[in-house]
Amino acid sequence: MGYNPSMDGLYHTIIAGVLLAASPFWLVRCALQPRFRRELAARLWGWKRLYPPPGALWIHAASVGEVRLAATLIHAIKENLPQRPVVLSTFTPAGWEVAQREAACDSFLLPPDSPLFLGPLLDRFRPAALVLLEAELWPGLLRLCRARGLPVILLNGRMSRTSFLRYEKIKPVFQWLTEGVLYFAMRSEDDARRVRRLGVAECRVGATGNMKYDALAEAPAPAQADPPWVVFGSTRPGDEEAALEAIRQLREGHPRTWFALAPRHLERVEEVAALLEDRGLDYVRHSQGALETNGEGGVVLVDQLGVLPEYYRRAQVAYVGGGFRPEFGGQNILEPAALGVPVLYGPHMNNFQEEARLLKDSGGGLQLDSSDQLTPMLRFLLEHPEERAQLGRQAAEAVRSQRGAVRRNLEILREALKFAPGS
């Protein structure tokens, strides 16, 4: 398509109008909400505190899950390309919080998608290349990179069927948006095929696997923990009712078992606490030192970000939420599986089809048709330790068999850096 100043100008004008229209709303929120005021200041000007050396790799990730992928990639870059500095941006405040803890490099919140903010950022950073993770296609950022001759690589790319159908209706816009992307390293051949069908040349697209498998901790979960744990992770509305009914019934026959309940979004903690209280279930919050509990069983409400893996490491079985209602499309079922924990999940795994198929085929994941099956399946696994241990081994092996995407993507990065300005 080539450089298209009219489309670029139209997009930048629309964004400028949106920012202008939103400014009164932002001013009101800044006056009333100190947290929003701090977040907005960090987004608009936080990058100005950083001074990465010219030629750094700029990696952009959306939120917590993508940031953890980025942390794995950054670790591999430091080992294999030690001369190459890295800077990481993220879109959400939660992602930035995780980045500051886990990424081992400078990080910042991505400013609005406008040349007003991104132009000065690029002038200061002068990166060698921009690496986008999964589906982070920001038009303003991509067009500015193209105008400056900055190579852009999409790693661990995903293109769901829903996204494909949406982009197919505006295929020329997608081609304009992505013409500056040097290479699309997609998670699977299905993702790669969809990108090709949108008009991206065969030589610019490949399937390199999912870095999510490389990012997962690999440590055996204990076959017999004392006390035993059942973890309900990343729950969404519709999951908690089934989980609480399972807890109520299972406590009668398993009084020493502990149950951890971790809402996907922390803003729902009080809502879930009210559900526990309505059911008459005593509980302790993680922030009150729940991991030190022992003796008689009980219920833990996980109310802090980033601690769910600690519970998965203790679990004998895990249910991962988001799969009982189609609008949520499931949550990440790989984290407990990698630790050798058998995983239960619902029928609607639209956003995690590859992962659900892998675990189901391996036998390490058990897909439930309805929430009514949750209690009897948990009871069976708690009462049959040999079957439970076998399922856990199959889950861990399934994850192990998929590793290697980070190594393949490093080779793509090496090639892409040959196109960096001044190379």
Image (cartoon, rainbow, N blue to C red):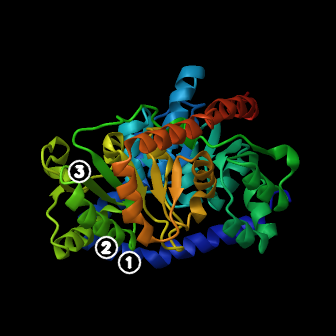
**Disc 3 crowd, CA 10 A, few/some/many (<14, 14-19, 20+):** many
Residue 165: x, y in percent?
74, 71
Give, as a three-letter code, the residue at label 1.
Phe
Q: CA distance from mark 3 to mark 2?
A: 45 Å
What residue is at 42 percent from the left and 74 percent from the top? 23
User: Could you tell whether 105 is left or right of 266 in the image?
Assistant: right
Q: Are marks 3 and 2 in contact (CB under 8 Å)?
A: no
Give, as a three-letter code, the residue at label 2.
Arg
Residue 300: x, y in percent?
22, 55
Q: CA distance from mark 1 to mark 3?
A: 49 Å
What residue is at 63 percent from the left and 49 percent from the top? 361
Q: Are marks 2 and 1 in contact (CB under 8 Å)?
A: yes
Q: Where residue 25 is drawn, which disc sits there?
A: 1
Q: Where residue 257 is drawn, which disc sits there?
A: 3
Q: Where residue 146 is drawn, which disc sits there?
A: none
User: Could you tell whether 205 is left or right of 163 in the image?
Assistant: right
